[in-house]
Image (cartoon, rainbow, N blue to C red):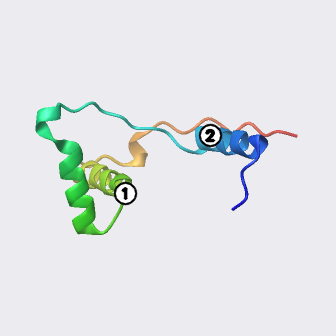
Amino acid sequence: MAKSSKARIAANGRYRLKAYETISAPARREERLNELLTIGATRAGVSKSVYILDTLRDRLQRDGITADDLPPLPAADTEP
């Protein structure tokens, strides 16, 4: 397997910063949420990330929160 060049790794990092946002929340260890998430994701046949995001989307939908509630995104800067 070929190693990724430093330039490729840097480009991938820039893309991830531009295209994705990280969602994070601390949880008390005694709740064992990480282990519960692992069980739920395994039973659903998906990754923990997919399981968490699906759960968030379901809750937002139940609460009637949609993208229409957000202000419009600023115009994307275009590079020459």
Q: Nearer the viewer, mark 2 or mark 1?
A: 1
Q: Nearer the viewer, residue 32 or 21?
A: 32
Residue at (31, 51) in percent of width and height: 52
Query: Between disc 2 and disc 1, whose residue precedes?
Result: 2
Secondary structure under badge 2? helix
Residue placed under numbered mark 1 in the picture = 50
Residue at (78, 41) in percent of width and height: 7
Judge from the rendering whether residue 62 lies leftward or rightward of residue 70; answer left or right. left
Judge from the rendering whether residue 40 lies leftward or rightward of residue 53; answer left or right. left
Q: Locate residue 73: give its quadrant.
A: top right
Q: Quadrant of the C terminus?
A: top right
Q: Position of residue 65 (x, y in %)?
A: 31, 46
| Amino acid at the residue labelled 2 | Lys
Q: Residues within 10 Å of mark 2 (few under 14, many from 20)?
A: few
Q: Nearer the viewer, residue 29 or 17?
A: 29
Q: Locate residue 34: give its quadrant.
A: top left
| Amino acid at the residue labelled 1 | Val
Q: Position of residue 46 (x, y in %)?
A: 34, 64
The number of numbered badges drawn on the structure is 2
Q: Nearer the viewer, residue 71 or 9?
A: 9
Residue placed under numbered mark 2 in the picture = 18
Query: From what the image shows, is residue 13 above or below residue 42?
Result: above
Q: Nearer the viewer, residue 8 or 25?
A: 8
Do callouts 2 and 1 mark residues in contact (Cβ within 8 Å)?
A: no
Judge from the rendering whether residue 53 lies leftward or rightward of residue 58; answer left or right. right
Q: Locate residue 69: give its quadrant.
A: top left
Q: Quadrant of the N terminus?
A: bottom right
